[in-house]
Structure formats: C-alpha cells, structure tokens
Amino acid sequence: MNRSLVRHFVLAIIAAGLALPAMSQVRMFEPPPTLVPEGTQAVAKLNTLMLGAKLSTPEGCEKATVDVNGRIVHVTLKEMYADSHIFNPAKDDKWPGHYDPLRLRSYGGCKQGPLIAVSPGDTLRVDLINDLPANDPSCLSNPPTGLSLPPGVGCFNTINLHTHGLHVSPTGNSDNVLLNIAPQTRFPYEINIPEDHPAGTFWYHAHRHGSTAVQVSSGAAGILVVRGNREYTPPTKENPHPMADIDTVLHNEKGKPLAEQFFFFQQLAYACFSNLPHQDGGPWQQIFTTAGLYNTSSPSTPTSPANAEWTCPLPTKDNYATPGQIENFALQLDSASIWDTNGRFTSVNGVVQPTIPIAAGEIQRWRFIHAGIHDTINLQIVQAVPQTATNNLVANSTFSGNRLEQAVDVKRECPTTPESLVPQFEIASDGLTLTRIHTLAGVSSVGSDGANYLQPGYRSDVLVVFPKDGYYCMLDQAAPPSQRFNPGTGNGGGSGPSTPQLLAIVHVQGGHVVSGDLQKYVEDSLYAANPQLPAPVRDGLRSGNLTPWAPFIDLPKASPGEPQHADFAINASSAGVFFQINGKSYDPNVINIKRQVNTTDDWILTSTGEPHIFHIHVNPFEVTDVIHMLPDGTQESIFDANGHCKKDVGTDPLANQYCGMWHTFRDTIFVENNYHVHIRTHYDRYIGEFVIHCHILDHEDSGMMLNIEIVPDLSAPGGGLGMAGMKHTH
Ligand SMILES: [Cu+2]
C-alpha cells in the first residue's frame, strides 16, 4: 500500500466511525444515485422524465454530470477507484456500525453508476473517462503469478460500456463491446436510440472481455431507463400495432403516475486481503476468512478457508489488511458456490437489507434489475409475523449474524405460506411490456415455486400492492434442495442461496386495507384510471390484457434454413478447463456466426453439465418453446396448447422458471441442462459485429462468448460489405 492509499484508508476509517449509523438503526431504502442536470430547460425535461425519483448523493459518490439539450442526453461518467462502505451484519464484524470499508472500481465512484433516463429518439452521449491507474499488473504479458489469471482474463483497468437490452447500433462508438478503453483515456460514446424504441427498464455495465466480471461485481453498472409517453392509438391497416407505452396507463384516477421504485440488486464480492510487503508473486493472494487466510492452496474440504466466510479485520501494522476489494478473479469470482459461502449479502441500491416504506392499498411499479454476475435471486415477498416491543427483528432491521445464523430468524419472522405470500403482478420482463399481466404467486414444498426468478442480467417490472399495515419481507428464497451447494462434494451452487436470505424489509403503514383478490384490485384500478381508452381496450385491462402496450406480439416464421445453435459447456481436458459455446472458446479475431440483416432465425439453446445464461446483444428474441429431453430419448414441451406450464413440469425444479415465458420477448434467458430452449429472433435494422455470451460473467471472461456479425447480404461478396475479407479470415 503506498502512502496516498494509506491516507485514504485512514480517512475512510474516520468516516466510518463518525458518520455511519449504529447497528440497531434501520437502514432506509435509497433510490439509485440520480444525476441533476444543469440549466432550466434541462430541469424541466428531467422533471417529467424522473417521476418521483428522489435526488441522492450517497457517501463515496463522486458527481457524474448530465446535460440535457433537446434530444441530446450528455452524461460524463468516470470509471474510478472510490472508497465507500457497506453494511455487514456478521457478528464478528469489528468495524464501527458494522460498515466494512470498500475500495471498488465503479462508474462515478458510487456503489452503482447513476441512473440514466432517456426517451425514444434521444441521442445518448456518454463521455466515458477511464480514471483507473495505468499501472495494471493484470494487463502485463507476464502477470504476477499470485493473481492466478486464467487464459483471457485480466486487464482489470481496461474498460468499455454496454447498454444492455437497448436496440441500438453495435458498431463504432455506439454499443460496441469490442472496444478496449485504456486507463487514463477518455472515450466519447454516441448512442442513437431509435424513435420506435420501446420504453422500459434497461441497464448499462462494463463489458470488456477479461475484466467484465471484476468490474461489474464491483459496481461498474447502473440503471438505464427509457421513458415513453406514447398514448394508445387504434390500429390501422398500415400500422396494425402502433407503439404505445405502458407508462401512459400506470397512473391513478387523477392522472398522477404510480410511484415507482428501482431495485438494483448487486452481489458485490468484496474481500479484504492481507497484502504482505514485497510478497512473492505480488499482492491479492490472501483473503481474510473466519477460518484463516484463504488462498489458491486452500483445500476444498468443508472446514477449509475456501468455504469460510470472508472477514474484514481492522488494519494493524502486522496484518496488512486492505479495504474490501475485488482483485483476484480466481479466488473471488470464478466459482458456482462462492456467493453462497463468502458471507456477503445481496444489496439493493448499495444498501444491505434496507427498509422501504409504502402505504397499504397503494399500487407501485417496482423495477427489479439483477446486476449480479453469478447467482440466481428467487424473489418472493411475504408478510412477517406481527412485530412487538419484544419481538422486533424485522421492525428494527436487526437480523444479525451470517446468512446461516439469520436463516433461523428469517424462517420464524418471515414464514413463506400461501397466506403470507404477496403476489407480484409482472407487467414487463427484460424491459419489454408483456402481452398480459403475469401473476407470480403460489407456494410449494420447494418454497420458491412462483418466485420471481431473476438471473444475472434479467429485469422484471412488477406492480405490487400490500393489503394491510405491517412488516413484509422481500426474500431471496433458497435454491431447490438438489441445487444447493454441498461443501466437500462440489455439488450445486448458483441457483440461489442454500437458506432463504432477507433482501429488504417493506414497512406498510397508513393508506387503506384491501380485502379480497389483489389481482382484481390492481386490474380494476387500472380500468378505473383510464377512461380515455376505447371501451374494448379499457375492458381488457380489467382482465390483465396489456397487448396494446406490448412492443412485440409474435415474430413471423423464420427465414428458410436450419436453426442456429448455442451450446454452452465447460470442457475439461489434460490441456485445461475451457469455457465454450459450440465447442469453441472466445477468440476476438474470429467471426463465429454471420447472418443477414432483416432476416429471422430460429435458435436452439442448450447447456451441458451445468446451466448457463444466454444473452444476445442488439435484438431481443421470442421464446417459442422449451422442450424437456427425457432420459428415454423422448422430447416433450413443458407448455400445454395454451402456453401454460403442464402440471407435471419436471422432475427438475429449475424448469418452473420458464412458466410464463411462452412467446414472451427477452434478451437474456436461463438454459437448463436437459432442456432445449427454442427462441426466434429478427436481426432488425443494424449491421455489424456483436456478441452472444453466458451472462454468468466469470464464464464470459473465461471464454463463453462468440462473435456474430450481421451483414447486408449473405450471398454477396464479403456479405455485401463491399470490402470482402478486409478484416477477418475464416
Ligand atoms: Cu455460463
């Protein structure tokens, strides 16, 4: 640690001691950091854009800037190391107020980047400043041995920016993830959002191959919301499905927009290292845990430091403890089980287990964004048992201890039963409005049945309403028993925690009691609030029909030809472990798939060995079917003729997360073993080179990615690009 780092660290300790709340104090929900535009014209526009968003300047945040001038939204965004803190309820945490110190690479210096709001037709300009140190040992041709970097992983200070889910150009200085923005340089992005772009919940994150997981798991990610004000207009012969935005329907009878909240879920995988001076092989080799120092020689036995919770001791002159950092890919990220064992908590807008207030009977739009890199979040909301003066763990937000210790309290205070469950009324997935409200409800012996299954990269917009006063728990339900991590055997991991985890507390107070069916209450409220709609359209709202506001209904049949394939597998041989799609690890110099613009393809997605998560840039896809491949060789759709999950779906408890996806449009999808996920996509409008990859981001960095190029004309020389063979050999 050099002198200026020591000074920063000391300042961080002082800040922790003086400014942070005590352990027993409720941590209030914080909206995401939001930019304040300069200039009156800009304020006027942003006020209409950022409905209800509270301005916030969380500690540790360096101000990014935004300037709105007509249709141009100009954001200056710095990726930098910044010091901040995060709550850690572990009993042995020694930091004042249980706030561990962090030093993370992030956009704007907050634990997440600022919320960026745009409208269809806007130009989003982002001046991305790479303020990370130029001295980057992970980028040397011979990196320090202590980093144990797998092939292709490294250059942790080289960055770029991906607008996840946006339908924009993937080339030049638009949404181009093949760029390498070097430390101490600046890059101007110019992203033209088409006039016909759907409104919805999107996000942005670092996507430079080899450093994506390190950066995203440390906060180089933020919310990108596209707001729309296109009112319903009746179809015409020329335009059978005019674009209309669900935003124009989500208001009360007086026209006041429904309050909305963003939940940006992060899995900040920080560890505190013991960096000995002049250590052989460089720093970042030893992680403090409750079972001693964890390093690459730690065994995989249940009692090993490799399976123990990470700790952050107060620094002394002998322990050489660092703040919480993300610097060692192999130790911190590259494992299906690490998030379940490392003792870290999934945070919401940078806060661990915050409390969010809401009135009974108030319908709100909650926008969930899974910005983690590896672990599923099985999101359910349940009513807590009544809180009293002597029994007030939920009311005072004083669940203490690690996740295993908290699990006992969580199960007692937040029981998951058919009676306690609060349904979620999903109106959009991956930012795209659904054709009908998808009700997430129902509890089985698995506990997570009917949960909102959020995989890394997913977004889900839900309407929520709480029937009466009291405390409610937002839970990350446990993975199904067969998928839980089992130390020592190497089984499982990744599909959720091994015990239910508390994500947030909802405090319902005031308002009015809702008795009876909550779905009917929500649908009737939407009906009552929208008398301007033609009768049949308005009537549809009363039965959950959102088709007029869904940007996509059904793609026409695919163009002639064989379907495309993406088969994910981790292949081990004597030569090493390879993360591959279609038997190949990522090679930036190869175009793996070339297709023609304005054509439509069917794709079949498969995973071998363990599940992976398919993500494609630029164009969303339609889920056309999910086929179960039975051991006897027969194949069976999980859906019935009406697109509902068949009753007996699966001996595989992970397959139920496809229920509700039939013919929905998405940009990211879970691919379970022994299932064929059928999708259809139209390569609309944009040509150029972009990527398909596993959204388990440590898999992506390790090679689970391929290049696809969309060309003007497949049958023309060079794909019709005019300069055949200019760049790539095949
Ligand atoms: Cu994967």
Image: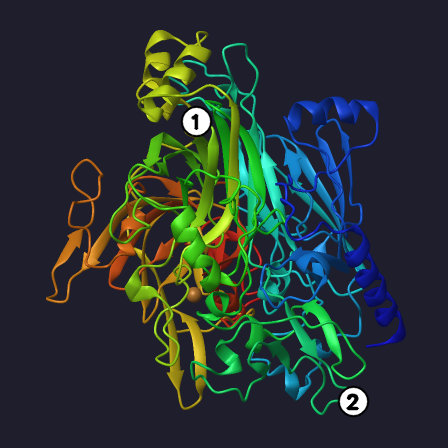
In this view, the mark in front (1 or 2): 1
Image height of 78 relative to 452, above or below: below
**Which amino acid, by three-letter code, is at mark 1?**
Lys
Secondary element under disc 2, as helix, strand or loop, is: loop
Q: What is the C-alpha distance between the residues marked 1 and 2?
A: 60 Å
- Circle 2 Cα neighbour tier, 10 Å, few/some/many (<14 / 14–19 / ≥20): few
Q: Which residue is mark 2?
A: 278
- Residue drawn at (44%, 73%) of the image: 579
- Residue 351, image x and y in percent? 62, 49
Q: Quadrant of the N terminus?
A: bottom right
| Residue 411 or residue 32, whichever sits in front | 411
- Which is more N-terminal, label 2 or label 1? 2
**Amino acid type, label 2:** His
Residue identified by numbered label 1? 468
Position of residue 720 in the picture relative to residue 121 (left or right): left
Picture coordinates of residue 244, whole percent (x, y): 47, 22
The picture places residue 625, in percent across and down from the top left corner, at 25, 47
Count numbered badges in the picture. 2
Q: In x, y percent, where is residue 455?
A: 44, 53
